[in-house]
Image: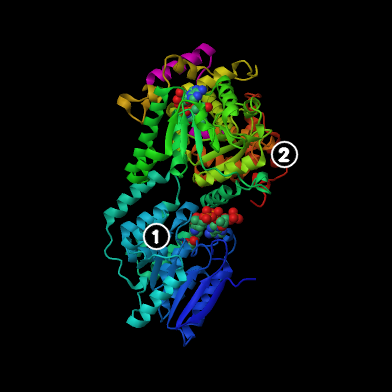
Amino acid sequence: MIEPVRYSVEDGIALIVIDNPPVNALSQAVRAGLAAAIGRFTTDGEAKVAVIAGAGRTFIAGADIREFGKPMAEPFLPDVINMVEACAKPVVAALHGTALGGGLEVALGCHVRVALTSTRVGLPEVTLGILPGAGGTQRLPRLAGAPAALDMITSGRHVGAVEALKLGVVDAVVDGDDPLEAGKAFARTMITDGNKGRRSCELDPGEKDPALFADWRASTKKSARGQLSPMVAIDAVEAAFDLPFAEGLARERALFTELMNSDQRAGLIHAFFAERAVAKIPEAQGTTPRDIASVAVIGGGTMGSGIAVAALNAGLPVTLVERDEASANRARGIVTKLLDDGVRRGKLSQARREQILGRDFSTATDYAALAETDLVVEAVFEDMDVKKDVFTKLDAVARPGAILATNTSYLDVDEIAAVTARPQDVIGFHFFSPAHVMRLLEVVVAKGTGADVVATGFALAKRLKKVAVRAGVCDGFIGNRLLNTYRKAADYMVEDGASPYEIDAALVGFGFPMGPFAVGDLAGLDIAWAGRKRRTATRDPRERVVGFADRLCERGWFGQKTGRGFYLYEDGARRGTPDPEVEAIIAAERKAKGITPRSFSTEEIVKRYMAAMINEASKIVEEGIALRPLDVDVTMIAGYGFPRWRGGPMHHADRTGLASVLADLRQLHAEDPFFWEPALLLARLAEAGEDFASLNGQG
Ligand code: 3HC
Ligand code: NAI
């Protein structure tokens, strides 16, 4: 077994190396090892300065998240860090990779911090539902001031070494790739100069600026959307200004413990591990992903342009094929605009923009242009005949071994694959709008799709900095099938008496960034309308059909793009206002059906919406469309705005209790036996006293 913390002495410098792959997390063994090493250094007459560095790809990436929710074993991290800081001889932290959370807190307890240029530092605890609990909220404001500390701690963002130097988080930035060498070099200068560094705990944080804290609370409350940790973290930072260091530490610890015991922490940790577990798919075993060095996109509308930009941003050259010159030029215009937005937001350099437009991006109207491409993503109109035509052409020109992907939202990928002579190369890559921003990629596996093609989808997602979820073929796959179901639950409530605005407000209160009707307006109501028309012929006669959305579409009200949908968007406004005419149209529909409207409380709206989502998700898992409940959770969080701190619908169902969800469904079943038929899987788990987590495996 490797020692998780190694101690050696070289030229009067103690080298303390943390070696706990893959990310040097601060497990109990590491904390104990670090404490022992510092104890040894203290009494080691040979060593004048110590350097703490990480072995492998990174410094310390934080506390060991797997230990969360379990009883903590000694030594506790704050004590170990206090011990480092109290050391009479100087300790240098030599940073590389990512120094995050407890990892950065160890560094803040050292007397000097040296970072390789490529290092990123951060306190991402709030994203896990907690706050920096090992002195970070007390030491960072003393080193970097309140504005920088509030920014880093409430956002959890990773800060590059150069910015960290400017902020005062690190003391020196060094080019190179060996942190231990960098640390040793700095330590040698300390021995020569007699520089002892400084203890952060002894620095004066300065006067508190109450207005700064008030502003920060107001803006964080808005952006946190019900998530507690960023708000509580502000209280902890404030303690650095209100209390002496030791009392501030105690306050931080108390707040940390409160958050550690919260449901939100459990939800966010579930989301963290679920996002990594989704990559554990059967196809990952024994296959090698195909090399992707070039991409072609067919259709440069909303999705095609966004997909092209996502690939270009990842350094892949893209050929975009459109129907005619005019459409190709329009697509080039959209791509240029998206790149310009990236430059404006500081996400893309001007030089890279020029390189993309001059060299990496091209448009064409002839499919021959993609003959040598490794991956083709089709994003033409959502129409089976059009898609089949495109895939027939692709089959004729694409090189053998090229991957042919469709971005269809709902259509049968097996049927599309069947028009080609190479179904093993055909797959669904379902991106989300805007495709260069949204993190989710549904990898839709058809009957004949090759395992290596599936694995390539996951590798591509990683390259595009997206999270891939494996889905099987059905109408809408995981996400849109769920969307269709919970949208119906919302429509039924509206027809029975709720207003779309009440529904949206209830779901925003639950933690969604927008409610379903506002989302419909944003996506374009015509898309769902086309879907409803397509399904008319095959619709089960028992299904309750609601017509008010069709009435809006018949008037040409497609949402934001037409200036009105469920909401009014005056003068191009992006936020809509409620529209009394829409309420009148809905009232007329109710009247025509003889429905006497009744009121719905916020709780009832949320209960029905969630019950519909959880029930359909159970069917999706039962049918194998999603591999595990956690795949549904990640789909909803990364693609549909489900509040991450609730851990996704399946985790939320577990927290609510499956027996209670089943009881709700059984009650609703009496009202509409077709829509509210409880899923067999849900009923089985609830009756056995089990939960969805039991199906997630070790993930
Ligand atoms: N604890 C336990 N396991 C961790 C971990 C952690 N802190 N961080 C990462 N891992 C595991 C992952 O689960 C994954 O395991 P797997 O291979 O079995 O799926 C493996 O390490 C590699 O992780 P990634 O796939 O995420 O690797 P990347 O190279 O893409 O990213 C990273 C590396 C940037 C370090 C990323 O893993 C990350 O952001 N980790 C979390 C960092 C974090 O939030 N730290 C704060 C922890 S809370 C804390 O410190 C509390 C303190 O204030 C008291
Ligand atoms: P869009 O209408 O904006 O763009 C479609 C583009 O395809 C048009 O520019 C059109 O000129 C081009 N096109 C049509 N036939 C073509 C052909 N034979 N060869 C080359 N180009 C052709 O449509 P949008 O919204 O981009 O959707 C595209 C696909 O992505 C659809 O399948 C849709 O279901 C899916 N999708 C849409 C999402 C959305 O939010 N809009 C989200 C996820 C998937």
- Label 2 sits on what residue type? Arg
Which residue does the numbered mark 2 point to in the structure image?
A: 684
Residue appearing at x 35%, y 25% in the figure:
569
Can residue 162 be found in the magenta stretch? no
Kindly indicate the quadrant of the structure image that contains residue 371: top right
Q: Is mark 2 within 8 Å of ligand 1?
A: no
Image coords of residue 646 (percent x, y): 53, 45
- Relative image position of residue 404 (x, y in whole percent): 58, 33
**Residue 498 visible somewhere in the drawing:** no
Nearer to us in this view, 283 or 81: 283
Secondary structure character of the magenta stretch overall: helix
Residue extending furthest toward the top = 592
The quarter of the picture where the N terminus appears is bottom right
Q: Is label 2 in a helix, a strand or a loop? A: helix
Q: How many marks?
A: 2
Q: Quadrant of residue 138?
A: bottom left
